[in-house]
Each structure stands twice: as structure tokens, then as C-alpha cells.
């Protein structure tokens, strides 16, 4: 028996982030299995530095086993839901994933939706930036996360204080 040659082994250990809010907030169910699967495949193809992905429809078909027609419909669903921005560069589609997280108040009622462009290398910093902003109303200095976070459907509760001190807005800074 000939001696076994040493082969280099390889395993792809890169990862991408999916927020629990996507599942528990109901967007996974609303989008459906096809759109959710396609979102995950496009996200897996996202460039860690630029945030752009450009898998072809054929690549998505091979990765998912979903028909071309269903992929095209699901990409439209993802665009309409605000999870995907599609642009054309020549004959290629380029995609940008949009993260969306529902912000809840202290009684767990929806207060706002925060969304931003997905940039894999900045996920942890973006989360820290959002948490800091929600707690303090300020963006931390030296942040490497995208500096643009969109807040949609913001609901603020104002309480009129009868002791003559004015209006207080749930402790947020003015």
C-alpha cells in the first residue's frame, strides 16, 4: 500500500448574522420560506468589506433548489419589504441587504423600526451603536459602524406634569 499523501483540509468557517428579531418579530413568517431562504443565500454572498452581494439568479437556483421564477418573485418581495436593495451594474444585479429591527418600549410595545445597510465587518459595532443610541440618544465616538441608521415609525409618549415643571418625554434628552 502506498503511503497516504498529506492533503490540506479546508472548512469555510465564515459566518453571517441573522437577528432574532427577524424570526420573533414575524418577518420570517410574513416573507415566507422562499424569500427567507433567498435572503440568507444573498447574505451569505455579501462582501464583508463593501456590503454588496452579486450572486446570479443561477447561483441562487443552485444554492437553494428554488425555481428561477420563484426566486425573481421572492427578490421583489424582499425589496418591497425593505430587506433588499437591488441595483444593476451592466448585466449584473448587485444587492445590498438592509437590516431591520423593531424597537420596543418598556412595556414591549413596538415603538420604532431601526434599519441600516448590512456591512458584515461592522455588525458588532452597529449593534453597540444602536444600543448606545437607544439608551443615551448619542452615537459613540470612534464608531466604525455605518453612521446612518434610519428610524421609522417612531412613537413617543409625552406626559404632562401638573407640578408646573413642564413636559417630560419618557426621560429622553431634548
Image (cartoon, helix red, strand yellow):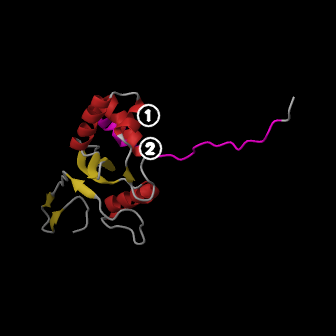
Mark yes or no: residue 29 visible. no
Give residue 127's quadrant in the image: bottom left
- Mark 2 and mark 1 in contact? Answer it, CB < 8 Å: yes
The spot of residue 78 in percent (x, y) is: 27, 40
Magenta segment's dominant SS is loop
User: Which residues are the magenta region?
Assistant: 4-28
Residue at image coords 40%, 45%: 43
The spot of residue 61 in percent (x, y) is: 38, 32
Q: Residue furthest right?
A: 1
Residue, disc 2: 44
Classify residue 78 as left or right of residue 143: left
Q: Does residue 7 belong to the magenta stretch?
A: yes
The spot of residue 138 in percent (x, y) is: 32, 67
In the image, is residue 56 above or below residue 154? Answer: above
Residue, disc 1: 63
Callout 2 crowding tier (Cα within 10 Å): few <14, some 14–19, many ≥20: some
The spot of residue 42 in percent (x, y) is: 38, 43
Q: Residue furthest bottom?
A: 141
Q: Earlier in the sequence, mark 2 or mark 1?
A: 2
136 vs 25, nearest the viewer: 25
Callout 2 secondary element? helix
Mark nearer the viewer, 2 or 1: 1
Classify residue 63 as left or right of residue 107: right
Mark yes or no: residue 57 visible. yes
Q: Does residue 57 belong to the magenta stretch?
A: no
Residue at image coords 16%, 57%: 158
Residue at image coords 32%, 58%: 134
Query: Alpha carbon of mark 2 to alpha carbon of mark 1: how far?
Result: 10 Å
In the image, is residue 91 above or below residue 5? Answer: below
Amino acid at each position: 500500500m502506498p503511503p497516504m499523501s498529506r492533503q490540506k483540509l479546508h472548512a469555510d468557517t465564515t459566518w453571517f448574522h441573522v437577528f432574532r428579531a427577524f424570526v420573533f418579530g414575524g418577518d420570517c413568517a410574513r416573507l415566507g420560506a422562499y424569500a427567507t431562504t433567498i435572503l440568507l443565500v444573498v447574505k451569505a454572498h455579501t462582501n464583508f468589506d463593501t456590503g454588496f452581494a452579486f450572486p446570479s439568479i443561477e447561483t441562487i437556483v443552485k444554492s437553494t433548489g428554488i425555481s428561477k421564477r420563484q426566486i425573481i418573485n421572492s427578490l421583489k418581495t424582499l425589496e418591497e419589504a425593505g430587506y433588499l436593495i437591488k441595483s444593476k451594474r451592466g448585466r449584473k444585479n448587485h444587492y445590498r441587504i438592509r437590516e431591520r429591527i423593531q424597537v420596543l418600549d418598556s412595556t414591549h410595545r413596538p415603538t420604532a423600526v431601526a434599519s441600516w445597510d448590512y456591512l458584515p465587518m461592522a455588525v458588532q459595532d452597529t449593534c453597540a451603536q444602536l444600543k448606545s443610541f437607544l439608551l443615551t440618544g448619542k452615537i459613540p465616538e470612534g464608531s466604525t459602524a455605518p453612521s446612518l441608521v434610519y428610524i421609522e415609525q417612531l412613537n413617543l409618549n409625552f406626559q404632562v406634569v401638573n407640578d408646573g415643571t413642564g413636559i417630560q418625554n419618557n426621560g429622553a434628552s431634548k
